[in-house]
Amino acid sequence: MQNKIQKITPNLWFDTQAEEAVQFYTTIFHNSKIGRITRYGKESYDKASEGKVMTVEFQLEGQNFVALNGGPHFQFNEAISFIVHCDHQEELDYYWDKLSEGGDEKAQVCGWLKDKFGVSWQIVPSHLTEMICDPDSVRSERVMKAILQTKAKIDIKSLEQAYEG
């Protein structure tokens, strides 16, 4: 990990799968690495946790994260998601296929997916914001309509065709 502490670091709360999740994510994102792993001591949320992984620091594409094994008290939901910006369809397909593997198929809509750990991801074209924020409201509304009709993974060519009219 870096010597300088990142100002804001996302912390992902898992029941007991923090290390497994980090290994999964770091195999998907090419510019990633696992950093410091801390373990529970005698003072932990339950006596059975002593010696088990408490936190795992890791990076995905240069962004620092922490994964915490905090017990079953909290679950992920769609109120928080990570957006993966993709430059071309092959890249979008790659991230969609890898992150959705073993995930909740019912949660796949409009480029959103929920992975096997319950974490929500948005896999989108890099230029999506540019298209939906176009000052030409006719163009931007066509793109929004196309996105809202998407049942799962986004097809970049379809969005570009909607944008162009």
Image (tube, helix red, strand yellow):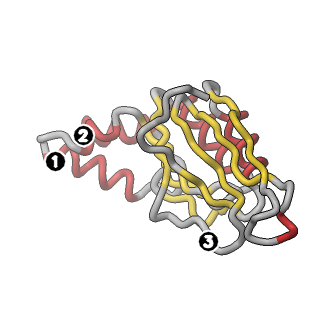
Q: In the drawing, does residue 13 fall left or right of residue 101?
A: left
Q: Residue at x 55, y 56 (%)?
A: 120
First in residue order: circle 1 vs circle 2:
1
Give the spatial CA distance, label 3 vs label 1. Answer: 42 Å
For label 1, the SS is helix
For label 3, the SS is loop
Q: Residue at x 87, y 68 (%)?
A: 48
Write down the quadrant of residue 47 in the picture: bottom right
x, y percentage for residue 124? 45, 41
Q: Which residue type carries mark 1?
A: Val
Of badges 3 and 2, nearer the viewer stands 3
Is 164 or 141 nearer to us in this picture? 141
Q: Which residue type carries mark 2?
A: Gly
| Label at residue 155 | none
Is 35 or 115 nearer to us in this picture? 35
Image marks 1 and 2: residues in contact by CB distance under 8 Å: yes
Q: Residue beneath label 2, please?
A: 165
Is 103 or 149 nearer to us in this picture? 103
